[in-house]
Image (spheres, rainbow, N blue to C red):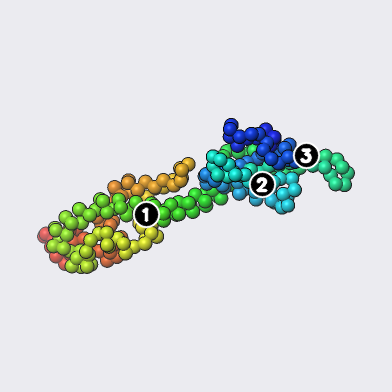
Amino acid sequence: MEKYKDYQPTGFDPKGLFLDDQQDWYVLYGRNRDSGILTESNWQTIVNEMTDISEEEENWDIHRFNHWACGWFEIIIVEKWAKSKRSGACYITQNFELAEEIEDQLDNYPVLDEMDLSEREYEDMLESWDLWACSDFKSAILDKFEDEILEFESKTENYLYERHGFQDLESEMDLFDKDDYFELFRDLDGYWETHSDGPYFDLEYTVEKMNLDDLFNFLFSDFVNPLTFVDPNQITLEV
C-alpha cells in the first residue's frame, strides 16, 4: 500500500490532492465509474470487513472524487497509527492490520469472495440476456430455420398450419417471453461466461446444433413430426 500523499489516480494527476489531514493514511483499494464486476465485488467485500471492525469509519475512510477521465472514482484509505485515549500510547489499528491481510490476499488471488462474485456474475448475465442476448438468440433461430420451415410445410402439405394454426416463424416466436428463451438456451446446453467487458453467450454454436424437432418441441407442446412418426398400428411383422 502507498500513502495517500504519494497516490495519484493517473500519471496526469497531482499526488495527494486534498485530504490534508489524511496524507499519511494508506490507500487500500479503489473503484471508478467503469469498474467491472470483480472490482465491485472486492470493493463491497472490503467495505463489509472494514465495517465489521469499525462501523464509524474511525480508522478507515471512503473518499469520492470527480475525475476528468472516468467521471468519478472512489478510494478506501486506512489509518496505520492511532493513539490510545486512555494511555496516550500509539498502536497499529485493526483496520490497518486487516488492510494488510486483504492486500496479501489480492496479491495471491484476485477474488476476495467467490460466492459474492458468482452471484454478481449471474445477475449480470440475466440482465444482459434481457437487454440483448435473448434478441440475438431469437434472430439467430429465425435466420437458421425460416427457410427450413417453408421446406417442411411444403413436404407435409402445410402440416403446421393445419394442426397448429402456424402462420410464420417470427409471429409464433413472439408468443414466448425472455424467460422461455433462456430456458430453451439452457435446455440446449447453451454456454456463457463472464469476460472483462461483460457476459459472453455462445449463441452461434447453440443455434447451430439445434434441429427442427428442437424448435417445434419448443413452439408446440404436443408436436409430432409427421416425417419421422411411425404409427404402431400400421407396423406389420414379417413371419
Q: Closest to the observer: 230 or 215? A: 215
Q: Give the position of the N terminus as an image quadrant.
A: top right
Which quadrant would the C terminus be assigned to in this image? bottom left
Along the polypeptide, which appears first: circle 1 or circle 3? 3
Q: Nearer the viewer, mark 3 or mark 2?
A: 2
Q: Amino acid at mark 1?
A: Cys
- For the point 27% across and 54% down, the residue is 142
Q: Secondary structure at mark 3?
A: strand
Q: Nearer the viewer, residue 90 or 49?
A: 90
Can residue 2 be spotted in the picture?
no
In front of the other: 126 or 63:
63
Measured Cα–Cα span from mark 3 to mark 2: 18 Å
Q: Residue at x 74, y 45 (%)?
A: 59
Gap between marks 2 and 1, in whole Å? 38 Å
> Residue 81 got which mark?
3
Task: Answer left or right for 46 relative to 163.
Answer: right
Residue farthest along the right direction in this orientation:
87
Horizontal and vertical percent for residue 191?
39, 48
- Earlier in the chain: of badge 3 and badge 2, it is 2
Estimate how packed mark 3 is, as few (under 14), some (14 to 19) or many (20 or more) residues with alpha carbons within 10 Å.
some
* Residue that mark 2 sits on: 62
The reply to whether callout 2 and callout 1 are in contact (CB within 8 Å) is no
Q: Looking at the image, do the residues carrying marks 3 and 2 touch, with CB atoms under 8 Å apart?
A: no
The numbered mark at residue 134 is 1
Label 2 sits on a secondary structure element that is strand
* Numbered disc 1: secondary structure: helix
Question: How far from the left and from the top, in percent, is residue 81?
Answer: 78, 39
Return the residue nearer the eye: 228 or 194.
Answer: 194
Q: Residue furthest left?
A: 239
Instruction: Name the amino acid type tagged 2.
Output: Ile
Q: Position of residue 228 (x, y in %)?
A: 19, 58
Callout 2: 10 Å neighbours few (<14), some, many (20+)?
some
